[in-house]
Amino acid sequence: MTALAALLLRDMRLAVRVGGGALMGVLFFLLVVTMVPFGVGPDLKLLARIGPAILWIGALLATLLGLDRLLAADHDDGSLDLILMGHAPLELAVAAKALAHWLTTGLPLVIAAPLFGIFLNIDGSAIGIVALTLLVGTPALTFIGLIGAALAVALERGGLLLPVLVLPLTVPVLIFGIAAGDAAILNAAPFGAPFLILIALTLTSVVIGPVAAAAVLRHGLD
Amino acid sequence: MNFGPYAAFILAAYSLTTAVVVALILWVLLDYRVQRKLLADLEARGVTRRSEPPR
Amino acid sequence: MEWIALANPSRFLALAERLLPWLAAATALAFAAGLYAAFFVAPEDYQQGATVRIIFIHVPGAWLGMLGWAIMSVAALGTLVWRHPLADVALKTAAPIGAAFTFVCLVTGALWGRPMWGTYWVWDARLTSVLVLFLMYLGLIALWRAIEDPARAARAAAVLTLVGAVNLPIIKFSVDWWSTLHQPASVFRVGGSTIHPAILAPLLVMALAFTLLFATLYVSAMRNEILRRRVRTLRLLQVHAAQGA
């Protein structure tokens, strides 16, 4: 347990230090949110209608783009080999790394989302609900992306391969995240069912992600 | 045989499917010939596998 | 014992050589019967008219697209659990063939949708899930093409295949849910479960024909892949011999 806690703290410290990518995700998120009105026009009604979708897609892209650093940096300097040889189960070790990654890149996105929601003309209570869906849903994105990060390390290929492999798997999270977020702005839409399914998806991916990523690393790095 | 007003769509669907199937068949056949030839060339130069008796 | 013998690549090659002419002949026969039934026997649908004939290639395409992923999942288990080279071959060669049939399903679906729904593409639940399946096939093929060492690529692809197999039902369920939430008003739906026997019989013959075609292509492609790996091994041996001398 102490080994995992140490790994978690180490990864978080590395992420917030110079050279870490913690705040880059938020900056990218802000840029996506800024670019959308240039694409669809400054119509505030339209922006309010598609606001939750923009926030979700922005968060999805920001999460995915940060993922190639999740395992690649440790692979480059050899510490991934130490983790592979360590006593802690590999599944839990990569889960700790993914958790650290989410705390330093996913959580800032969730905190920034209400602020960016103002740009998109989403009103007060709705912003809270969208942020809540992001809080519940973004861990799923990180843990699904963990599989992609492991594949990128095992194949020694970064770049676009990772999002190409991971994006189709995030379709359910996106569907239920936006559906729950839409409930906040459309009175007719249900909130409870999609929100609970979103929680279920997150819990499922927290299990599947580390197991699959550990399998990729074990089979791919020998 | 009358395909009605949508003959073009039916024709397009069947010809596209035929094109895909023909492409797959060609891929399989040409690939087979290429690999056979490469294998024959290598064996002609005396490169053999471990499971075969050595020269 | 039969199956263990089959797992030897050389035995597989010998069997494939004997089996392929029969498979190809059966495929040709089934297609002759299926196409005849589809064009001359099957009546026109009272709603769809002659476009019902597109269904005879559209549905088998969907079925084989899904069968392809199922086969890959079994092969992926073979790769990860037994680390068998023939399982790697089976895993790799199913991807392009499955992707091709999924593509056929998508394109014929669009060509059927234009006269029936008035638009080439509808974000209908079934179409959308097949599109996601197609994208996952393309991702898997991209993965195979990204790495040269076939054994390492096989293990990475196997994990991704199994993750995809777990995810595909979830994706199907979410897309169904999403589609009922956003159901467009103008789409008129075709009853899926009540197919008239006069339409069903040609459909089944065509499904059989396409399945035989899939089997023929699959066995041939696996044979080619085994040969490709032999060429690769021989080349590596040649290089080693040259370095050793």
Image (cartoon, coloured by chain):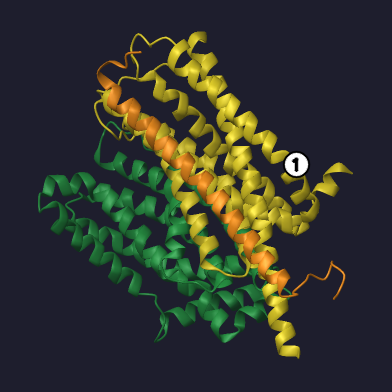
Residue C155 makes an appearance in the image: no
Q: Nearer the viewer, residue C80 or C167?
A: C80
**Quadrant in the picture for the N terminus of chain A:** bottom right
Q: Is residue C235 left or right of residue A135?
A: right
Question: What is the chain identity of the residue bearing mark 1?
Answer: C
Number of labelled discs? 1
- Supply the letter of whichever chain is yellow: C
Q: Residue furthest bottom?
A: C245
Instruction: Choose top left, top right, bottom left or bottom right for residue C179.
Output: top left
The residue carrying mark 1 is C18
Q: Residue at x 16, y 56 (%)?
A: A39
B52 in relation to C48, above or below: below
Q: Position of residue C62 (x, y in %)?
A: 49, 33
Q: Residue furthest right?
A: C1
- Supply the letter of whichever chain is green: A
Q: Residue at x 73, y 45 (%)?
A: C17
Q: Nearer the viewer, residue C116 or C53?
A: C53
C222 in relation to A59, above or below: above
Q: Position of residue A212 (x, y in %)?
A: 62, 59
**Quadrant in the picture for the C terminus of chain A:** bottom right
Q: Colour of chain B?
A: orange
Q: Position of residue C226 (x, y in %)?
A: 69, 57
Residue C58 makes an appearance in the image: yes
Q: Residue at x 59, y 48 (%)?
A: C94
- The residue carrying pointer 1 sits among few (fewer than 14), some (14 to 19) or many (20 or more) residues within 10 Å by Cα, namely few
Q: Residue at x 69, y 34 (%)?
A: C22
